[in-house]
Image: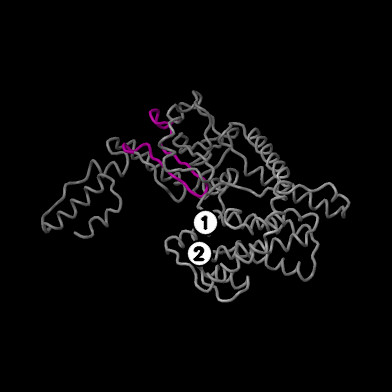
Amino acid sequence: MFGYQPLLAIYGSQAELTVFTNPNAAYVSAGQFGEVLAEEFVTRTGTRVQGTTQFDRLNALTRAGVLVGWSREAFDKLRRGRNDAAHNHLFDTMKALEALKLCWQLGDLFDRAMGGKRTVAAFVPPTLPVDVQSADPEEIAELQETLEGHRRALAESRVKLSETSDRLEAERRARAEAEELIASAQRAKSAYAAQIEELRAQVTELRAAHQQRYDRERVQPRRIASSARDAIVERAQRPAPLNEVQARKKIDAMLTKAGWLIQSKADTNPLAGRGVAVEEFTLATGRADYVLYVDGKIVGVIEAKREGTPLAGALAQNERYAAGVLREHAMAVWRRDEPFAFRYVSTGAETYFLNRADPDARSREVFTFHRPETIAAWMKRADEEPDAPTFRAALRTSMPLLETHGLRMAQVDAITGLEGSLAVDRPHIMSLTADG
């Protein structure tokens, strides 16, 4: 956040440094963070604001589509919290801790909206000071429980199931990474506290310069290309990227909705339904996140990825599936020469599909997983028509002869051109022939 606006670093750090020792001051700093961040959103999107209050800014950003749902609610909580702290002197450490997390979440949203990065991140909770132990025991117990929940969420965000075949080992590594992040943040506190003290001496000048710039651009918003503004709005409206644990839950829900039964490797029963998805399946060259059975036959595979991973070429480049399955599963494979014909890679938010039964296979984005009945129909066609195993293959090799009787020459040319486009998989074929 410092790279965008020094005031954000000052107010955010002040909120973190005082969250346990002076929650009222932390609440005020969190509210100031929210105000400056809203002003940054306004100026960087060229949004016109009628009025001078934070409420006016938030309404303008909501009308522009920058703030939706949780983000508007988060800004409102910081706004109301600052007002309460300023007038009623709130000394509620739990609420101050919540405000600190809201600052982090909104700062993360700003980073994603402005930069477009989809890196999985999580709130790193502060460490409860030893000298706070003399406070109310019930409040301390509640704080410790809340902080432990934040630590678990941080550890979950670090889980990398795809890097090990042992889920427990992946979770152990994630917990160790989370604890090191927390310890590192604690060690860094004294260093950035000193830096903040230096900046605090300049806060009056920084605030004046920021206010002058904001007032100028509020009256005359900067000119921003509509495409750039639309991109910021689109990124701001997208939910935060899913970590691997969240992605697995989303993938499970998508599979269930598409008609698949999800089973663990220990409880595998390929005939329990038309389509069965087996988790953590052991292959000849490692492990698959999910292996797909249709009518008792192994036909496909799903790779679960962390969001932010480029998916378009992931399936075509991953040749480890060519080695197939272990000998004990060999008789269940639908096609020996292509053990996993139907391949998916998914983050839960984005899914790509590759049909290796097609002679000219290519990956493409899909909304969700295909139903078992659909894949069963593809399998039947591939078995019965080996020369044209897919619809795309048929378009290339077995287009019927055009009957030109009664057609004008322009119509013949248009249809021939359309068939040629279909044969070579040219996209937007209708637009290509529209002028004809």
Residue 45 shows which numbered tag?
Answer: 2
Q: Quadrant of residue 181?
A: top right
- Marks 2 and 1, how far apart at CA: 10 Å
Of 112 and 237, which appears nearest the observer? 112
- Residue annotated with mark 1: 114
Q: Earlier in the sequence, mark 2 or mark 1?
A: 2
Of 327 and 367, which appears nearest the observer? 367
Q: Quadrant of the C terminus?
A: bottom left
Q: How is the image coloured?
A: one colour
Q: Quadrant of the N terminus?
A: bottom right
Of 200 and 293, which appears nearest the observer? 200
Answer with left or right where residue 307 lies relative to residue 381: right
Q: Residues within 10 Å of mark 1 (few under 14, many from 20)?
A: some
**Mark 2–mark 1 CB contact (< 8 Å):** no
The amino acid at mark 2 is: Thr
Give the percent coordinates (x, y) of residue 43. Answer: 53, 65
Main SS, magenta region, reads: loop
- As for residue 359 lying within the magenta part, the answer is yes
Q: Which residues fall within the magenta stretch?
A: 333-360
